[in-house]
Image (tube, rainbow, N blue to C red):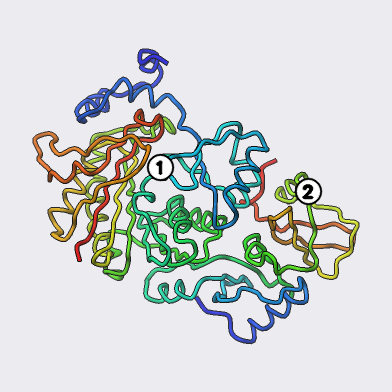
Amino acid sequence: MSPGKSLSKLILSDDLREYLEKIPDLDLNLLLESYERPIPEGLRVNTLKSSEDFVVERLEEKGFKLRKIPWAKHGYIAEGGDLGKTIEHMLGLIYLQGPVSMAPVEALDPKPGETVLDLCAAPGSKSTQIAQRLKGEGVVVANDISYERVKALSSNLQRFGVLNSIITLADGRRYHRFARELFDKVLIDAPCSSLGIISKNWGIARNWSAKIPERLSKMQQRLILSGFDCLKPGGILVYSTCTLTVEENELVVNYLLENREDAVIEPLELPGLKFRRGVVEYMGLRFRDDLEKTARIMPYDNWAEGFYIAKIAKRR
Amino acid sequence: MEPLGPTEKRYLLERLKGQHGVENAFEGLVLIKAGQGRIRAATKETLELAKRLRKVQQIGLYVAKLSKGDVVLSIEGTQLLDGEIKKNVIELDEAAAEEWMKASPITSPKKYTSKYVVAKHGEIYLGSGRFTRDGKIYPQVAKWRRVPE
C-alpha cells in the first residue's frame, strides 16, 4: 500500500498532523501506512491450564498458522480464522493479546513468589500474563478505577484460571496511601491517548486534540509516583503506554526521576523487538540522559502496535 | 472475604465425594464464601495479602456453587480437580464439546447417579451440566463463556 493511498483513506486533522510532525524520529508516511494495516492477531498459550505443545497442536489441526513471537514467552502470531470463536479461547487455553502489548510484562519479568501490582489492570491482559509468569506462587494484585472495567478484568482472570489474584477497585493515584513499599514489582500500563493503536480504531485520530496528552500527562505523573511508592526498595517498576506522545512518555518518567532520588532507569532486553531510544530533547525541554534507555516502539517498527516502555528500579 | 467454616467445608467435600468420587478437593487452598452459594478458592498467601489491602473486590477463582444441596463445579473448578473426578463424568468428542460450550443440551444414553455431571473432552474439563430425567444434560456454561453460534 503506498503512502499516497493511505493519506486518501485515513484523514488526519491539521492539529494531529502538526503534532505528529514534532515528534522526533517519526516517519509520518510510514506511520500513516501502519495505521491502515490491521494489527496481527496475537495470542498467548495459557501454561497455567495446559501444555504449550498440546494447545499449539490443537490450533494447528484446526488450520491456524502460528508463528512464535521472539520477545514474548508463550506468545504467537496467528493467522487463519477468528480465534475469538474457538473453544480454546472460551476455555481459557489461550488469551488473545496484541504482540507488542506482551512486551511490558516481559520487561517486568515477574518471578514465582513475587508480589506484583498491576495498577491500571483492566481488561486484564497483562495481569493474566503476570499470573502466568508467577506460576501460581506469589500474588498478582489487579487494580482499576472503573467498576465497569473491573467486570471484564474479573472475567478474564477467571477464564485464565488465576488462583493467586486479588482485584481492587481504587484510584491508582492514591494507591500508595495504603500499599507503600508492599510490592516487589509494579506495572503501570497507563491510560493514554492511544496513538500507537489507531489502526484498531480510527476514531482516536478523529477525536484528537492537543489538550488530550496534556491532561493525561498530569494524571500519569501522579500514577507513576504512586506506583513507585508502592515498590519495596530493590523493586522494579515498568511504565508503559500505547501512545507516541512525549508528554505521556518521557516527560512522565522524567518527572519521576526529578521527584524520587532512588529511581534509576534500567536497560531493556526484548529480543527480536525493534525499538528506538527514548527522547531526551523535545520542544526546548531537556530530560535526563538516562531516558535514552527507555524504548519507543513505532507501529511501523514491527508492523504492530506502537508502544513506549520504561523500566525503573528502586535503589535499596 | 469470609472463609468457609469447618461445617460448610466438610459438607462441600462430602458432596464432592458423593457426586464425583473426589477424595482430595482443593488441598492447600483456602475456600471463601462469595454470596448466593458461590465458593471461591485462593492460595493462603493471596488471602493474607488481601487482608492488608483496601477496596478489595474479589480474590482467587470461582470454583463451585451450592445449589439446593448439590455442588455445581465451574469450568475452572473441574479443571482444578483434574485427575480427582472419578464418577458422573460424560466424555465428549470435539463436535459435542463445541455444542457443550454453546450450552446446547447433550443427549446421553447413560444414566448418572447425580443431578450434576462433569464434562470432559480428552484432557480438558468443561465444567458441569444438569442431568434431567429425559436423559438430557444441560451445560451450565455462563453466557460470556459460550462459543458464539
Q: Which picture quadrant has residue A60?
A: top right
Residue furthest bottom in the image: B7
Number of the label disc, if any, that sits on residue B93 = 2
- Mark whose residue sits in front, 1 or 2: 1
Q: Which picture quadrant has residue A27?
A: top left
Identify the residue at horizontal 63%, vertical 40% (top origin).
A59
Q: CA distance from mark 1 to mark 2?
A: 36 Å
Identify the residue at horizontal 33%, vertical 25% (top origin).
A31
Q: Same chain for labels 1 and 2? Say yes or no.
A: no
Residue density around tag 1, few if under 14, some if 14–19, many if 20 or more, within 10 Å: some
Q: Which picture quadrant has residue B40?
A: bottom right
User: Is B103 or A102 nearer to us in this picture?
Assistant: A102
Whether residue A113 is visible to the viewer of this picture, yes or no, is yes
Residue at disc 2, secondary structure:
loop
Residue marked by disc 1: A71
Q: Are marks 1 and 2 in contact (CB under 8 Å)?
A: no
Whether residue A206 is visible to the viewer of this picture, yes or no, is no
Q: Position of residue A23 (x, y in %)?
A: 21, 30
Q: Position of residue A106 (x, y in %)?
A: 38, 49
Q: Quadrant of the C terminus of chain A?
A: bottom left
Q: Chain of mark 1?
A: A
Disc 1 marks a residue whose amino acid type is: Trp
